[in-house]
Image (cartoon, rainbow, N blue to C red):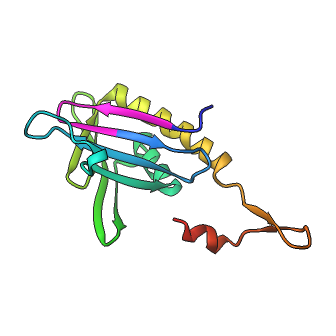
Amino acid sequence: MTDAHSQPFFGKNTALFVQTRAKNEPFIFLKCIKIKDNDSWEKPSLGEGKTIKCKLEEIIMMLRVLNHEVESWTTVHNFKDNKTPISFNWKREKEDILWINIGGYRKKLLFAQVEIFKLLLEHIIHEKIENATIPSFKMTENNELNSLIVTEERERF
């Protein structure tokens, strides 16, 4: 087991990265970059590309699409009054193609990439459930253990 993950899915013009920083954080990041006019890739370190933070519930919804339980899933992220539409949609052709749209970024995943993406998300969700849902405790002045208030934990996100 590792504490972090980073898996790129490169295409001709767009790349999608699935990233985690720590197994005890109840979220993942999806990062998109694309080819610029000068044929170089956008650089997130320069503020280019698009990164979204996905909660456990959203990972479950992605898995529902990846497991063909639903044809599509759509949501909108709101971060600092910046709304980003997100969608996962199957397109049936000769083979199943999954289209992932995050803001103005559109990434196509073919069978092998879909399977890797699905296996990775299944692994991550199990890891996060085991490690990121453990309550935090602190000692009081009387040496008693007290659970941190859930609302304090929610405010971090």
User: Which residue is at the far left?
Assistant: 37
Quarter of the N terminus within the rendering: top right
Q: Is residue 136 left or right of residue 25?
A: right
**Looking at the image, which is closer to me, 48 or 95?**
48
Asked where in the image residue 76 lies, by quadrant, the reply is bottom left
Query: Which residue is found at the position 63% from the left and 52% from the top?
Result: 132
Q: Is residue 40 left or right of residue 72?
A: left
Query: Which residue is found at the position 8% from the left and 36% from the top?
Result: 38
User: Which residue is at the far right?
Assistant: 142
Mark count: 0
**Looking at the image, which is closer to me, 133 or 71?**
133
How would you classify the magenta stretch by its main secondary structure? Answer: strand
Q: Position of residue 21 (x, y in %)?
A: 51, 44
Decide if residue 89 is in sight here: no
Q: Is residue 97 left or right of residue 140?
A: left
Query: Which residue is found at the position 59% from the left and 38% from the top?
Result: 3
Q: Is residue 67 left or right of residue 3?
A: left
Q: Position of residue 113 (x, y in %)?
A: 35, 29
Asked where in the image residue 114 lies, by quadrant, the reply is top left
Q: Position of residue 82 (x, y in %)?
A: 28, 68
**Looking at the image, which is closer to me, 143 or 95?**
143
Q: Position of residue 44 (x, y in %)?
A: 29, 46
Q: Is residue 28 magenta?
A: no
Decide if residue 91 is in sight here: yes
- Which residues, given as a range, are shown in magenta? 5-16
